[in-house]
Image (cartoon, grey):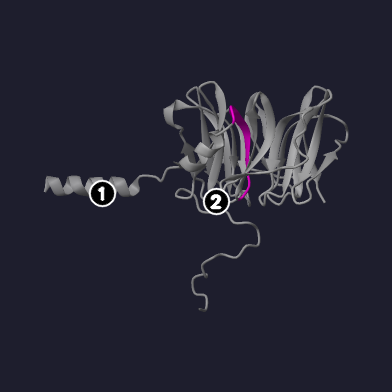
Amino acid sequence: MISERRGRATVQLRRLSDGTVSPLPQLGRHQPHSSPSLSWNARYLAVITQRGGRRLAVVADRLNGRMHPLPLPSGRAPIRLSLAPDAQQLALQVTDQGQWRDELLDLSSMLEPDRPPGQALSTPAVGADP
Amino acid sequence: MSRVVLILSIVLLVGCSPDRPTPRSDLNGLLRQSVSSRRDPSLGSRWLASLGQRNGRERVELVDLQRRTPVPLPGLNRSDAQPISVSVSADGERLAVVQQRDDRTELLLYRRSVGAVQRLPLEPPGVPRSVSLDGQGKRLAVQVSRNGRWDVDLIRLP
């Protein structure tokens, strides 16, 4: 969710089981943040940030600490976003010629899938019996 | 020698360049068809819920991204209601909607398999603004205006 921190809209990730706030060091800057969206297991957090006076959608990978900026063609600015539960697609609301549009981006070449809880992996673990 | 270094550099640069997001051109074309605008996207595993405007009126719409077809939502869109926010569960079965109707703003849960709309009361009362379902469709986070401030309510769903 988004909360005010030092007067700036900042994304905050709270664990529902115990209420603890998880650190998001990759997202400590580039406020204001808006429109946060999580994958199944909260490995990935997509959010709209602001850099150099322009809005930029990013995906933070909480497993390895990497940030994936998602610049849009033609300098269009994201307004809202939604990350697919497995993080293989992202939907973005943008403004195009004065109208709102929703656009889909395929992230499968960038991000490993975040599978639903309890779903078996499709490949056997290393060292597993055939 | 310098040519070899140059070729190696190009190969290394290409090999190290980060993968980039790819626009889903086929689906983006479908999403533009027959609506004058579309906003508030919410992605499930193979579903996109959004608010599409046709003939000056906004409606909740659901698209099956695998079959590339709109999905009917009987009983959800009313002529006397204005949707404000929508969210879909991962399996596309449940949609949470904030809508304005008769000068009041209400929170709804729609179950697609039975075509049923259920009004979800807020306790204490407040004005819902934005809604987000978890992937399993069992928990709902809703942004609520109360006494001049924003709250986030969590609602467990049966």
Is residue B143 visible to us here?
no
* Residue A49 image point, x, y percent: 55, 31
| Prevailing secondary structure of the magenta residues | strand
**Which corner quadrant holds the N terminus of chain A?**
top right
Which residue is at the front of the view, B67 or B126?
B67
Q: In this view, does B91 lie above or below A5?
A: below
Q: In this view, does B14 lie above or below B130?
A: below
* Residue A113 image point, x, y percent: 54, 54
Instruction: Report the residue that reaches farthest toward the bottom.
Output: A129
Judging by the rendered image, the residue that carries numbered circle 2 is: A63
Assign a secondary structure to mark 1: helix
Is residue A76 visible to us here?
yes
For badge 1, the amino acid type reads: Val
Judging by the rendered image, the residue that carries numbered circle 1 is: B11
Chain ID of residue with mark 1: B
Q: What stretch is highlighted in magenta?
A: B35-45
- Give the side of residue B121 with respect to residue A50, left or right: right
Q: Magenta stretch containing residue B13, yes or no? A: no
* Residue A82 image point, x, y percent: 60, 39
For badge 2, the amino acid type reads: Leu
